[in-house]
Amino acid sequence: MKNFALIGASGYIAPRHMKAIKETGNHLSVAYDVNDSVGIIDSISPASEFFTEFERFYDHANNLQLEPKTALDYVAVCSPNYIHRAHIAAGLRLGCDVICEKPLVPSVKDLDALELLEEQTGKQVRNILQLRHHDSILKLQEKVKSAGERNTKFDVDLTYITSRGRWYAESWKGDPRKSFGVATNIGVHFFDMLNFIFGSLQDSHVHLSEEESAAGFLEYENARVRWFLSVDANNLPEDVKGKKTTYRSITIDGEELEFSEGFTELHNISYREILAGRGFGLKEARHCIETVEKIRSAPVNIAMGDMHPFLRK
């Protein structure tokens, strides 16, 4: 049984980490968040210590390291995007391996700094890139591999609209200085998936870059991808509005990839892989970090690359 600390306990994704820790047979020793709305802990790990001040959390974690029985093995990071690097660094310096939500960090420079810190501490960082474990994605990857060399690349449309209310703009997620923008915040794991399936990125163009929506074109070794991402419910297809708040679609050569289900266990699978000595580290995360960094820094240019059908509307 491994001992875990969790940073960012009141966030949306934190309960999935808490459940994954418990359901893989491990122990959540201590959790931290500046907010105290963490009642979910009672139904998962009620004996866990909890702190709302980082200094007290870090001091407690250091004290746990003094005894082999209580020493922490892992720190799980579920905090806002802009403080991932600081919290990952804190976990490594505690002498723990770190499991962090996506996006791991905003830039390649940050990634390089973490690689150096891994070398200094002898500990490792693992990124939650859960789509790499999804059955439909694994089958598609195998299909692309088995297709061998083609005269033309796969034509892919990626559309993801996940409606957010007015609270979103007031939260850290609505602040591009903290979330790094909608393409990074809700798109980074899709860009990782595209690299996982279709190979290295060769070209990128941005067609839309707004607070609530982004769109563009990506060309990979084996695919040409038109992408559209949004948190604005007004962008939902007409046949979806009023019925669902989320629309997720990937088409490959005009054929829809069905992957609307199968998400609930992906964090558990990710944890099992990490605990077995596998998982996805800084090397695997590098490509999607490079991709979102390029997207954020690129000028909007609708004259380059194919435009997504939603953007044409």
Image (spheres, rainbow, N blue to C red):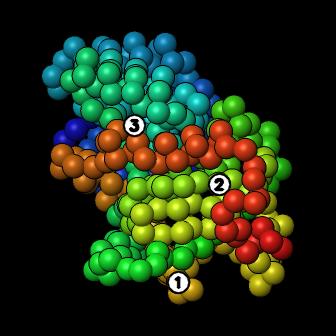
The crowding category of the residue bearing disc 2, from other C-alpha atoms within 10 Å (few below 14, some 14 to 19, many at least 20), is many
**Sooner in the amino-acid sequence: mark 1 or mark 2:** 2
Q: Nearer the viewer, residue 253 or 185?
A: 253
Q: Quadrant of the C terminus?
A: bottom right
Q: Secondary structure at mark 2?
A: strand
300 in relation to 82, above or below: below
Residue 226 x %, y %: 62, 67
Q: Quadrant of the N terminus?
A: top left
Amino acid beneath label 1: Asp
On screen, residue 75 versus residue 295, left or right, reads: left
The crowding category of the residue bearing disc 1, from other C-alpha atoms within 10 Å (few below 14, some 14 to 19, many at least 20), is few
Q: Find disc 2 in the rendering and name its residue.
A: 205
Amino acid beneath label 2: His
Asked whether the beta carbons under mark 1 and mark 2 sit within 8 Å of each other, the answer is: no
Q: Find disc 1 in the rendering and name its residue.
A: 253
On screen, residue 171 versus residue 105, left or right, reads: right
Corner quadrant of residue 169: top right
- Give the residue drawn at x 67%, y 43%: 298
Q: Say if residue 38 shows up in the picture.
A: no
Q: Find disc 3 in the rendering and name its residue.
A: 76
Q: Secondary structure at mark 1?
A: loop
- Give the residue drawn at x 32%, y 81%: 147
Residue 79 x %, y %: 54, 35
Amino acid beneath label 3: Ala
Corner quadrant of residue 69: top left
Residue 26 x %, y %: 26, 44
Point out which mark residue 9 bears: none
**Sooner in the amino-acid sequence: mark 3 or mark 2:** 3
